[in-house]
Image (spheres, rainbow, N blue to C red):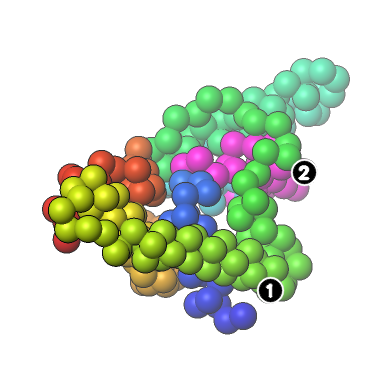
Amino acid sequence: MNARTAVIAVALAAALGWATPAAAHCDTLDGPVVGAAREALATGKVEHALVWVQKDDERPIREAFAKARKARAAGGAAAERADTAFYATLVRVHRKGEGAPFTGLKPAGEIEPPIAAADRALATGNAQDLEQLIVERTRSGLRQRYDTTVQLREYDPMDVPAGRDYVGAYVQYVHYVERLYDASDADAHAHAPASARPAPHVGQSAHRDHAPAAAAAHAH
């Protein structure tokens, strides 16, 4: 699978609503942000952690890093607490940069299936399983909405409730297709520096399927 397809696959996972960027796995103990914090402490190089925050947010990371390194030198329970405090600081500042709240570090093992698959693909150098996961879910979602719309399409024009059922199914079907189509153009910003990418729309749900059919129908 080429790089474009891999990017599209991960974007489709977001479009399908598994996780928004702000609620993925950056706050879990086995996520990449805490992994970078551990690497920074193990090597003594704070740069491993700094890549996860914006330039203007470096100061609290450097300060927490210095405290953790000093506590490590003393050893004992204080060192463990300092490590955890550094993890929390890095995650909190990282999430602030995404426009997301920090509600504490989450236990390991709470990573969503598509995100875990994306990480495995990077670790193994093989994105085949990731592609299959996304393609199968996409195909199933598209087919389900298509079949429902087709089944409801042949209604009596005088039966308004039946007509509204069709319109509701049609809107869900078309919006799903729109999301997939938009996500497939994800490579537009895939290689741009983080500072050049659009800011995430915090609080905006990827799901529009449950919007009232009558209101959504006006979009068409």
Taking the image as drawn, is residue 216 in sight?
Answer: no
Asked if the residue under mark 1 is in contact with the one under mark 2, i.e. CB atoms within 8 Å, the reply is no
Q: Is residue 34 magenta?
A: yes
* Residue 142 appears left or right of 81: left
Quarter residue 38 falls in = top right
Q: Which residues are magenta?
A: 22-47
Quarter residue 1 falls in = bottom right
**Residue 8 position within the rendered picture, expressed as x and y whole percent measured from the top left:** 48, 70
Residue furthest to the right: 76
**Residue 218 position within the rendered picture, expressed as x and y whole percent measured from the top left:** 14, 53
Q: Is residue 18 magenta?
A: no
**Residue 5 position within the rendered picture, expressed as x and y whole percent measured from the top left:** 53, 76
Q: What residue appears at the point 44 percent right and 30 percent down from the top-left corner?
A: 101
* Residue 187 appears left or right of 164: right
* Residue 28 appears left or right of 94: right
> What is the distance, in whole Å, between disc 2 and disc 1 at their CAs?
33 Å
Taking the image as drawn, is residue 209 in sight?
Answer: yes
Question: Within 10 Å of the Cα at label 2, are there few (<14), some (14-19), or many (20+) other Cα atoms?
Answer: few
**Nearest to the observer: residue 198 or residue 79:** 198
Given the image, on which type of amino acid does mark 2 rest? Ala
Residue furthest to the bottom: 2
Q: What residue appears at the point 76 percent right and 68 percent down from the top-left corner?
A: 124
Secondary element type, mark 2: helix
* Foreground: disc 2 or disc 1: 1
Report the residue marked by disc 2. 42
- On screen, residue 167 above or below 146: above
Report the residue marked by disc 1. 128
**Nearest to the observer: residue 94 or residue 166:** 166
Given the image, on which type of amino acid does mark 1 rest? Gln
- On screen, residue 217 above or below 109: below
